Amino acid sequence: MNFSRRSFLKVAGAGVGALALPSFAWRGLFAQEAAAATRSLVVIYLRGGADALNIVVPFADSRYYELRPSIAIAPEAGGDGAPVIKLDKQFGLHPSLGALKPHFDAARFAPLVCTGSPHTTRSHFDAQDFMEYGAPGSRTVRDGWLNRYLSATNKAAGIDASRLRAVAMQSLLPRSLRGEYPVLAVPDDKVLNDGKLIDLFDDVYKDGDKKEGEKKSGEKKDAPKDMMGERREEDSVTQTGKDTVETLKRYKEILKRPIEGKRATFGVDKFGRAMRDIAACIRANVGLEVASVDVGGWDDHVNEGGAEGALAQRLKTLGDNLAAFLEDLGPRAESTLVYVMTEFGRTCKENGNEGTDHGHGGCAFLLGGKVKGGKVHGQWSGLAEKDLYQKRDLPVTTDYRDVFATVLAQHMKFEVPKGFFPDYTPKAVAGLF
Amino acid sequence: MKLASRLALACLSGALLLAAQAPARAQETRPGTGTAPKGLSEDQRIIHFLNRFTLGATPRLLAEVKAKGMKAWLQEQVKGAAPEPQFLRDRLGEMGSLELSAAQIVDNYLEQVGKDATPRERREAQILENIPQKELIDSIVLRAIYSPNQVREVSADFFRNHFAVSVDKGPVKWLAVEYERSVVRQHALGSFADMLKASAHHPAMLFYLDNCLSSRPASPEELEAIKRRGKNVPERIEQAQQRGLNENYARELLELHTLGVDNYYSQDDVIEVAKCLTGWTITPRNSAKPLTFWFRRDAHCGGDKVVLGKTIKSDAQNPVSEGEAVLELLIGHEGTAKFLAWKLCRWLVNDEPGEAMVKRIAAVFQKTRGDLAAVYLAIFEDPDFFTEANFLAKYKRPFEFVVSALRATGAEVTEVDAIQRALAGMAEPLYRCDNPTGFYDHAEAWQDPGAMALRWKAALDFAKGNVRGVRLPASLYADLPEDKPMEWKALLAARLLCVPLSENTSRAIDDFVARAVQASGRVKVKDLAPEIVAGLLGSPEFQKQ
């Protein structure tokens, strides 16, 4: 199916004509103040296929221990390494995620088991692309599900110069944020702190029309010509340059604003700094709706470790910074939802190298917002071989598109229109909010 | 015959004639526009050619190719025999690790520091340990900028990404120097078949994608035997049980190196390929031939395997041949030819290469078992190579941007560390790709709002001399008339760019210079000219190739 963003927008009811206007023009048309308390969605992507079974551990199932003789997390203290942090009679958290337990108890944290893609691929790269495009199996959809949300709501959201609707805390955008709506990929501090840089390139990437008013001569200029002396309808490089200047100016200005009240203690690692800056943007009240952070390194084929080791260390960084984030937001955590996802889970049985190979069903975390935490969500069918996907992996009982749609509808108050997910009508995930 | 049908026939044959000529004429007319035939000018053709077959066109190279002719130049290039300039040979000659084997590198650069080592000793050991990977990156960047064998550099750039390994994974940092030399560069103008085999046997790949750990699981009989022997039973049982198949390399071999994702193969094929390759591992450090390919017979899965519908017979005499047979099967497979042809056309022609061209290149690839010189010549001679649609249609990757900027400015590079750091900032550090796909090769992956500022920053830093080890030559600014700043832009553009400046960039730089003149009265070449250079290198036209 040839699904393009434009055809979606038609379905969504936004005028195609609006798209034909230069972006600055329709930004101006709908200028209004950002809503005082925007709902924010923070998406954290664990790249590499995080091992769901050692994150939300089915400790009550003896099969779990049979399948994982060297990397399982002990059910009780006194066993091999720190035991699981019990959430209920069936599931426990990896012991590195202790910082999240109080949030589970306070019903702010909802783990979701057996979620993932209906597509069979075990390729990281395809699985990630399909997921971030919200289009399993499609090679024609080229814009991310979060960008589709941003594009579809752009008009209604209202735009003003001080507003920053979306950022990715890394030098390249994740696919979920690629698309028509210009999202800022935040470059490093050296770039942010170079005062002259943006001014110089503001000139170079300014479009012809905008400069018209500034010109003294008043001579009539045609649309910018390219080096072949021909008019090109759109030059994506120039457009990207303009977006870069505009969004960077905005972001720099926002980070300069003072933040009222105390800050929580974040890690000094890259992830910690990213979460700290996202929290700052949310607390600055600039209408930040979507933020995203990638965390790499979850492809544990070898020496994954159990209660301690490689996975344990990564989970500690993740859990501690998530807890710091919720603390830092304070009451704003009510209007902010954190969604932690990964492309797939891993084999239930450990492999020959104290690791696990690519699997199918995975897990997700939802924290904050109005999520119904304090409960492990998702449909679990056990670890008996006959109940596993292709006799080896967790099955997928909750399609990620259903979670995406539920999050957009319940948290972002955006009713997902028909066609948002190509060839798919999502179902609400019951009881999640 | 009736008139009408005769007319119809005439029209039909006319249409057929047109269709037959279509590929040849595509470069002259765009169908349906009704405009007069217009193709690339001769200069544009050469610029396009250099944009794709070098890591940065320069006015000098333009003149060289003009004099020699593109085809003759390319035919020489695919031999890769142009002598490297003396200064480059000297620089490379100073690097002690480049010609060493992996084992020699470990011997020479890895120092075991004892528990009682002083912090200084530890630091020194650390510096020593990092020399090989530093020299690896230095040599790649210096050759990319200065080697006259540019087609080899372009090809190496492609295959370094196609068969990506990362020095961030354990001992790969010891192994990558030899990998770059004996896998990537050795075969960059040779045959894909040889390169695939070399990569499959190389310790860097065996380790990076975990195949060195993959082995058959312990059989019940073996476990029984351990129990019968009665020595250290629990540990031995545990060791034996932890052994097993690792699918990582087998999957990427099919998905990334040969057939393309989910093309032709299934999960069962992944497992069967993994079984064929069990036992392909690395000799230990204390062995007679350390850190080389080792086939461990006792780790190999017995039994027949079925890969892509073909039975690979169990070969008890020579079980390593099963893995070799898999590689042969993949080398000759039409899927490999199609995937590699598509990927090379994407790299060298257009982000979305036309199907017809890919098909033609795939045919050459398959017929020659991936003779890369033949493939590159075929791409150059393909009727769809020199089209207007392809001209300046590719957005430079960060590596291409940085190298082309340094080539265009004639930069003198004495240290590479800062360049590698800049590449890391732009998310493309050499030999440090986070995943085995290699870095992306199409605009969409790099062209994000925000990401462009990283290029601007690099351009400004290069131009202003703020990058350690990189100096733009004084000659770049020579002869700029001090008292006529409005003329500097045109002179600098002619020195840096092979294409005319767009009206927009031209006007923007004029405005910027005029403002500077207005603000300070008199401006100096050394203050303002670098900023003009930065503006040119950061301009939209310099991001394209």
Image (tube, rainbow, N blue to C red):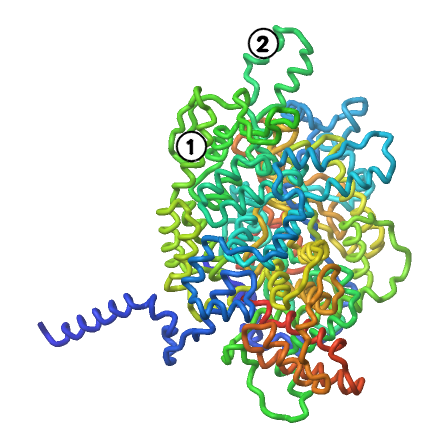
Query: What residue lies at 87% left-to-right and 51% top-to-bottom?
Result: A264
| B328 and B43: which is toward the camera | B43
Residue B453 drawn at (x, y percent): 69, 66
- Whether discs 1 and 2 lie on one chain: the answer is yes
Label 1–label 2 contact, CB within 8 A: no
The answer to whether residue A87 is visible is yes
Q: Could you tell me the amino acid type at mark 2?
A: Ala
Residue wearing tag 1: B325
Residue farthest along the right direction in this orientation: A261
Q: Residue at x 73, y 71 (%)?
A: A198
Q: Chain of mark 1?
A: B
Q: Where residue B540 is drawn, which disc sits there?
A: none
- Mark 2 — on which chain does it sit? B
Pick the front one: B502 or B533: B533
Report the disc number at residue B225: 2
Q: Is residue A35 above or below residue A262?
A: below
As helix, strand or loop, the secondary structure at mark 1 comes to helix
Could you tell which of marks 1 and 2 lies nearer the N-terminus? Answer: 2
